[in-house]
Image (cartoon, rainbow, N blue to C red):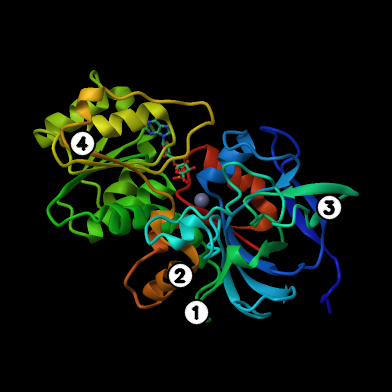
C-alpha cells in the first residue's frame, strides 16, 4: 500500500539544457491538498517536450518532462473532489481553474494558473514533489508525465470515460485538441474551403484530419521532410510542398495554386519565418491564419502592415481553444463513439524504458506520435 507514502519509481530527468534525458530512480511524495498522485499508463512525445528539453520553452533544471499523459489516480490530497483513486484521467498542460479571468471568459482557455510561459517548475504552493539522489527535481508544466508516478494539481487533471483505451488515449491530452481542435473548433473550417498546413508532424497531421473532416476541398501540406508526405496524403492532404525544393517563397507557390490564397492557414512548426509564410498564404479578404507552433522566447516576426487592413485574421490557438477540463472528456467520448479517429495519429508505441530509442526516432523525423507505455 502506497497511500500517504513516498513512492520510489523510474522517471526521465533533463539535468541540463539540450542534454539527453536520463532514466533515474526518483522519489515521488504523496499529493498535498488540492493535488492527485497519478500512476502513468501512457504518454506521448510532443514537439513541446522537445522544445522544453532544448530550452526553446525555458524551464528550470533539472526537471521531469512530459505533458501528454493518461493514467490512473493512485491517491488524492485533501479537498480534491473531481477525481478519486482508481479513476482514469488525462493530464492537462493548460489547467482550468474556473476562477481566473481566462477561465471566466467564454472564449479562450489559457488559464492564469498555467505553468508554461513562464514556468516555475513547482506546484501551486511553490514546492516540488520530486527528488532524485537527494536533489530537488522540478516539474514541467505541472504534469511531468515521463515518470511512472507523478503529482499534479486537481486543476491539471481530468477524469475520462472508464472505457477509454489507456495505451492510446493520451493523445487526446494534447495532439488531438491542439491540431484537430484548431481546425474544427477554432478555425471552424468550412465545406469546400482551401487550407494550407505548415508542418506535417503530430500536430499538423491532426490539423489535416480536422480540415478533411469539415469538408475542405483542398489541403496543401508543407514540410521540409518529404518522408511525411505519404502519410499526410493518406490523411487528406491533396498537394505537398517542400519549401527547400521551390525556386520561390512557399507562400507564392500557395497563392499560385489557389489563385489568390487559402481560406485557412495553419502553422504547426514554431518558427517566425513559417508564421509569416502562413499569413502571406491567406486570402487577402477573409483568410484566417492560425498560429499553433510555440516559438523561441526572443523570436519576433514582422508583417507588411498593408496586408493586415484588408480583412485577414491572425489568431493564436492553444489546445484548440478548448476549456480543457470541460472539453477533453467530451473528446474522449467522441472517440469512443467513433466520431473522431485518433489511431492514424499514433505511429509508434514503445515501453517507457526505451525512451531513448523513441527520441531517436522522433529526431530522425520517423514518428508522427510515439506513445510510451508504462
Ligand atoms: N519548414 C517546414 N516544415 C518544417 C520546418 C520548416 N522550416 N522545420 C520543421 N518542419 C517540420 C518537421 O519536419 C516536422 O514534420 O515541422 C514538423 C514538426 O512536427 P513535430 O516535430 O512532430 O512537432 P509537433 O508535435 O507536431 O509540434 C509542432 O506545435 O505544439 C507545438 O510546440 C509544438 O511548436 C511545436 C509545434
Ligand atoms: Zn503537447
Residue 193: percent from left, percent from top:
15, 50
Question: What residue is rendered at 12% in x and 53% in y?
Answer: 192
- The answer to the question of whether label 2 and label 1 lie on touching residues, with beta carbons closer than 8 A, is no
Give the image location of residue 230, x and y in percent.
Answer: 31, 45
Q: Nearer the viewer, mark 4 or mark 1?
A: 4
Q: Residue furthest left?
A: 259
Real-space Cα separation, disc 2 to disc 1, in angstroms: 13 Å
Numbered mark located on residue 248 in the image:
none
Q: Secondary structure at mark 4?
A: loop
The image quadrant where one finds the C terminus is bottom right
**Element type at mark 3:** strand
Please tell me in which quadrant of the rendered image residue 341 appears. Answer: bottom left
Q: N-terminal of the two: label 2 or label 1?
A: 1
Q: Which residue is mark 4?
A: 282
Label 4 vs 3, first from the N-terminus: 3
- Tell me if mark 1 has few (under 14), some (14-19) or many (20+) residues whose alpha carbon lies within 10 angstroms of its own: some
Q: CA distance from mark 4 to mark 1?
A: 39 Å
**Which residue is pictured at 66% across the width and 63% down the height?**
153
Residue 131 circle label: 3
Are the residues at dot 2 and dot 3 in contact (C-beta closer than 8 Å)? no
Total number of numbered discs in the rendering: 4
Residue 52 in the image: above or below residue 255:
below
Crowd around label 3: few <14 · some 14–19 · many ≥20 (10 Å): some
Question: Label 2: how many residues lie within 10 Å, few (<14), some (14-19) or many (20+)?
Answer: few
The residue that disc 2 covers is 326
Do residues under tags 4 and 3 come within 8 Å of each other at their CB atoms?
A: no
Q: Which residue is drawn at the image coordinates 36% and 50% (left, top)? A: 205
Residue of label 1: 161
Numbered disc in front, either 2 or 1: 2
Mark 4 neighbour density, 10 Å: few (under 14) some (14–19) many (20 or more):
many
Amino acid at each position: 500500500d502506497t497511500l500517504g507514502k513516498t513512492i520510489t519509481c523510474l522517471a526521465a530527468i533533463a539535468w541540463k539544457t539540450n542534454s539527453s534525458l536520463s532514466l533515474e530512480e526518483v522519489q515521488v511524495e504523496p499529493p498535498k491538498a488540492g493535488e492527485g498522485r497519478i500512476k502513468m499508463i501512457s504518454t506521448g512525445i510532443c514537439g513541446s517536450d522537445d522544445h522544453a528539453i532544448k530550452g526553446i520553452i525555458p524551464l528550470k533544471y533539472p526537471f521531469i518532462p512530459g505533458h501528454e499523459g493518461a493514467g490512473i489516480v493512485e491517491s488524492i490530497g485533501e479537498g480534491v473532489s473531481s477525481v478519486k483513486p482508481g479513476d482514469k484521467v488525462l493530464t492537462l498542460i493548460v489547467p482550468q481553474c474556473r476562477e481566473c479571468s481566462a477561465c471566466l471568459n467564454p472564449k479562450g482557455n489559457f488559464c492564469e494558473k498555467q505553468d508554461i510561459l513562464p514556468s516555475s517548475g513547482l506546484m501551486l504552493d511553490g514546492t516540488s514533489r520530486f527528488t532524485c539522489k537527494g536533489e530537488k527535481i522540478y516539474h514541467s508544466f505541472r504534469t511531468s508525465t515521463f515518470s511512472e508516478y507523478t503529482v499534479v494539481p486537481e486543476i491539471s487533471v481530468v477524469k475520462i470515460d472508464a472505457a477509454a483505451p489507456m495505451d492510446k488515449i493520451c493523445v487526446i491530452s494534447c495532439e488531438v485538441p491542439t491540431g484537430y481542435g484548431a481546425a474544427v473548433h477554432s478555425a471552424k473550417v468550412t465545406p469546400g474551403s482551401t487550407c494550407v498546413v505548415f508542418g506535417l508532424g503530430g500536430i499538423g497531421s491532426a490539423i489535416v484530419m480536422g480540415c478533411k473532416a469539415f469538408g475542405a476541398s483542398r489541403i496543401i501540406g508543407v514540410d521540409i521532410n518529404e518522408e511525411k508526405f505519404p502519410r499526410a496524403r493518406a490523411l487528406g492532404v491533396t498537394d505537398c510542398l517542400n519549401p527547400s525544393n521551390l525556386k520561390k517563397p512557399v507562400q507564392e507557390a500557395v497563392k499560385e495554386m489557389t489563385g489568390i490564397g487559402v481560406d485557412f492557414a495553419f502553422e504547426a512548426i514554431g518558427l517566425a519565418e513559417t508564421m509569416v509564410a502562413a499569413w502571406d498564404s491567406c486570402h487577402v479578404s477573409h483568410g484566417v491564419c492560425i498560429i499553433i507552433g510555440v516559438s523561441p522566447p526572443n523570436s519576433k516576426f514582422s508583417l507588411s502592415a498593408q496586408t493586415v487592413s484588408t480583412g485577414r485574421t491572425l489568431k493564436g490557438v492553444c489546445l484548440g481553444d478548448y476549456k480543457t477540463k470541460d472539453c477533453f472528456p467530451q473528446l474522449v467520448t467522441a472517440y469512443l463513439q467513433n466520431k473522431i479517429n485518433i489511431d492514424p495519429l499514433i505511429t509508434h508505441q514503445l515501453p517507457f524504458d526505451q525512451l531513448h530509442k523513441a527520441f531517436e526516432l522522433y529526431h530522425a523525423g520517423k514518428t508522427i506520435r510515439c506513445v510510451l507505455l508504462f
